[in-house]
Image (cartoon, rainbow, N blue to C red):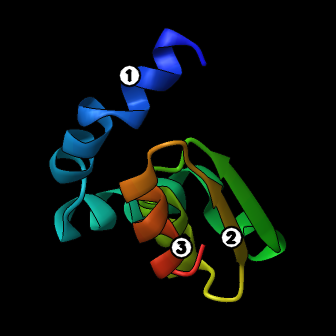
């Protein structure tokens, strides 16, 4: 396993979860994706995110397109457990 993988699997990755999750951030990401993707969001049926953390980006996309199939891949165990609990 690389140093980078160990770094994200450890304490830094755990702390990142706490620093980068809030309702305000979800709202901001949803607004950003709405602007970036515009009316094309309806044409996207699925999304996979590598390094998804707890899935905030995927949650934001689902706000815009609730039927979108989302899958996240995450190396940090605690983030992964939250990602799965959130349905990704």
Left or right of 71, for residue 84: left
Q: Quadrant of the N terminus?
A: top right
Residue that sits furthest to the top in the current view: 3
In front of the other: 49 or 40? 49
Sequence order check, earlier mark of 1 and 2: 1
Label 3: which residue? 84
Provide residue 2's location: percent of width, then percent of height.
Answer: 57, 13
Provide residue 4's location: percent of width, then percent of height.
Answer: 48, 16
Residue at point 32%, 37% (across, down): 13
Q: Secondary structure at mark 3?
A: helix
Residue at point 44%, 52% (across, down): 77
Label 1: which residue? 7
Callout 2 environment at 10 Å: few (<14), some (14 to 19), or many (20+)? some
- Asked if marks 1 and 3 touch (Cβ < 8 Å), the reply is no
Label 2: which residue? 70
Callout 3 environment at 10 Å: few (<14), some (14 to 19), or many (20+)? some
Sequence order check, earlier mark of 2 and 3: 2
Residue at point 56%, 68% (across, down): 61
Provide residue 65's location: percent of width, then percent of height.
Answer: 63, 80
**Label 1 – label 3 distance at C-alpha:** 21 Å
Position of 27 relative to 79 (above/below): below
**Label 2 – label 3 distance at C-alpha:** 11 Å
Position of 31 relative to 1 (above/below): below
Q: Nearer the viewer, mark 2 or mark 3?
A: 3
Left or right of 13, for residue 72: right
């Amino acid at each position: 396993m690389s140093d980078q993988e160990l770094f994200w699997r450890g304490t830094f990755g755990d702390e990142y979860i706490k620093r980068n999750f809030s309702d305000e951030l979800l709202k901001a990401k949803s607004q950003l994706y709405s602007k970036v993707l515009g009316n094309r969001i309806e044409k996207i049926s699925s999304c996979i995110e590598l390094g998804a953390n707890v899935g905030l980006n995927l949650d934001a996309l689902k706000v815009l397109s609730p039927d979108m199939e989302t899958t996240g891949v995450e190396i940090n165990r605690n983030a992964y457990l939250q990602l799965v609990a959130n349905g990704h």
